[in-house]
Image: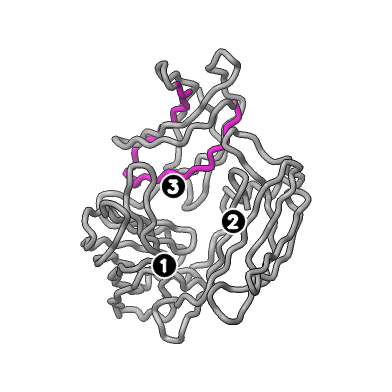
């Protein structure tokens, strides 16, 4: 785990998959909180039985601790977990001392070996939703994750949306879970308005499952899905694609930069990245007073083949924004889910 700021919460949910069911039933949950200390240690704690406190202490990043945590809201059941914090990252760009072997950090952002595919395609159509709720105006969209592939619907503008939007995934061996998250689009950070897990095991070719899936952890909200499986000749498969005028989604993870030029007279910069993709523009958060910022921020774009341009800027509250550098990401030749780690600005 790579944690941000000085506190963090790890939430663990327990599910049950009944035989011949299309969804996973939520059973119980528990939480573990953690806090960074100035000596580069980390404290872990959770609420135990009879409202007692279970606490553990890791002397440095990379030190493994084991905790036995009871589930909340149930009369019995507990979970044994082993925890290792790889690194703490702070808003000013600094890091924990990180005595842990940094070689494992690369795996956080790079792809592992390809997943085994069955040679079938799974078609998932997000048809409609009903009774979705948010704290403000409801502008819902849905994210789907199967294996490493992430897809996203367009944004609707009603609490009872109709998408009728189809997605295609390569079926993966030993992975029968489709993860669904529903959000309402907001100006200053999208609101999570429910999630669900759908069991994809036992899909028959030529037979369509038409189901309403209730969203969890919310008072109301359901999504209607149509799911079927199709045998294809190409057993290698390809990245899941979305029907429409584009070929899926680009997931750009802006990890970090180093040795940026100093744009301020005090010898530092307040860098952020503005990304231009066709007519779309998105930007990261500002990292103040650093030449080696760490954003660890993900931006998504519908893949239409446009150049992906990155512009590194120095934030100024009063003066015009100044340019630190820019580059173009050559992503078109990348295999699915493989992420280039380094680019040079010019």
98 lies above or below 311: below
Name the mark on residue 217: 1
* Mark linked to residue 251: 3
User: Looking at the image, which is closer to me, 254 or 79?
Assistant: 79
Element marked by disc 1: loop
Q: Residue at x 60, y 30 (%)?
A: 292
Relative side of 188 to 86, left or right: left
Give the Cα separation between the discs numbered 3 and 1.
27 Å
Q: Is residue 3 above or below residue 124?
A: above
Residue 57, position as x, y percentages in the image: 75, 56
Crowd tier of the residue under label 3, counting other residues whose Cα lies within 10 Å: few below 14, some 14–19, many 20 or above: some
The local secondary structure at tag 3 comes to strand
Q: Nearer the viewer, mark 3 or mark 2?
A: 3
Nearest to the observer: residue 316 or residue 52: 52
Label 1 crowd bin: few (<14), some (14–19), many (20+), radius 10 Å: few
x then y, percent, for residue 178 = 42, 68
Residues tagged 3 and 1 counted as in contact (Cβ below 8 A): no
**Magenta extent:** 291-316
Between disc 3 and disc 1, whose residue precedes?
1
Asked if the residues shown at circle 3 and circle 2 are in contact, with their CB atoms under 8 angstroms apart, the answer is no
Specify the label residue 112 is tagged with.
2
As for residue 30 lying within the magenta part, the answer is no
Q: Residue at x 37, y 53 (%)?
A: 191
Q: Earlier in the sequence, mark 3 or mark 2?
A: 2
Question: Image height check: is 120 above or below 266?
Answer: below
| Front position among marks 3 and 1 | 1
163 with respect to 23 (left or right):
left
């Amino acid at each position: 785990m790579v944690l941000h700021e000085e506190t963090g919460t790890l939430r663990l949910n327990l599910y049950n998959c009944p035989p011949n069911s299309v969804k996973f039933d939520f059973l119980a949950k528990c939480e573990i909180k953690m806090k960074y200390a100035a000596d580069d240690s980390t404290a872990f704690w959770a609420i135990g039985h009879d409202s007692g406190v279970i606490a553990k202490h890791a002397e440095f990043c990379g030190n493994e601790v084991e905790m036995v945590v009871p589930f909340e809201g149930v009369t019995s059941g507990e979970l044994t977990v082993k925890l290792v914090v790889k690194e703490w990252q702070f808003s000013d760009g600094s890091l924990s001392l990180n005595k842990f072997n940094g070689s494992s950090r690369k795996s956080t952002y790079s792809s592992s070996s390809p997943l085994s595919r069955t040679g079938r395609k799974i078609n998932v159509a997000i048809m409609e939703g009903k009774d979705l709720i948010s704290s403000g105006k409801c502008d819902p969209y849905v994210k789907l994750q199967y294996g490493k592939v992430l897809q996203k619907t367009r944004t609707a503008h009603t609490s009872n949306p109709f998408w009728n939007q189809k997605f295609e995934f390569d079926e993966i061996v030993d992975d029968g879970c489709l993860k669904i998250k529903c959000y309402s689009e907001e100006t200053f950070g999208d609101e999570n308005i429910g999630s669900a897990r759908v069991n994809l095991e036992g899909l028959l070719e030529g037979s369509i499952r038409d189901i309403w899936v209730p969203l969890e952890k919310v008072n109301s909200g359901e999504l209607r899905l149509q799911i079927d499986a199709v045998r294809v000749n190409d057993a290698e498969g390809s990245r899941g694609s979305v029907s429409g005028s584009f070929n899926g989604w680009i997931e750009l993870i802006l990890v970090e930069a180093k040795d940026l030029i100093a744009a301020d007279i005090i010898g530092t910069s307040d860098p952020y990245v503005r990304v231009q993709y066709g007519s779309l523009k998105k930007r990261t958060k500002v990292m103040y007073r650093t030449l080696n910022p760490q954003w660890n921020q993900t931006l998504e774009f519908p893949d239409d083949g446009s150049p992906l341009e990155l512009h590194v800027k120095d934030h100024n509250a009063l003066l015009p924004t100044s340019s630190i550098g820019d580059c173009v990401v050559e992503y078109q030749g990348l295999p699915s889910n493989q992420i280039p780690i380094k680019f040079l600005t010019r």
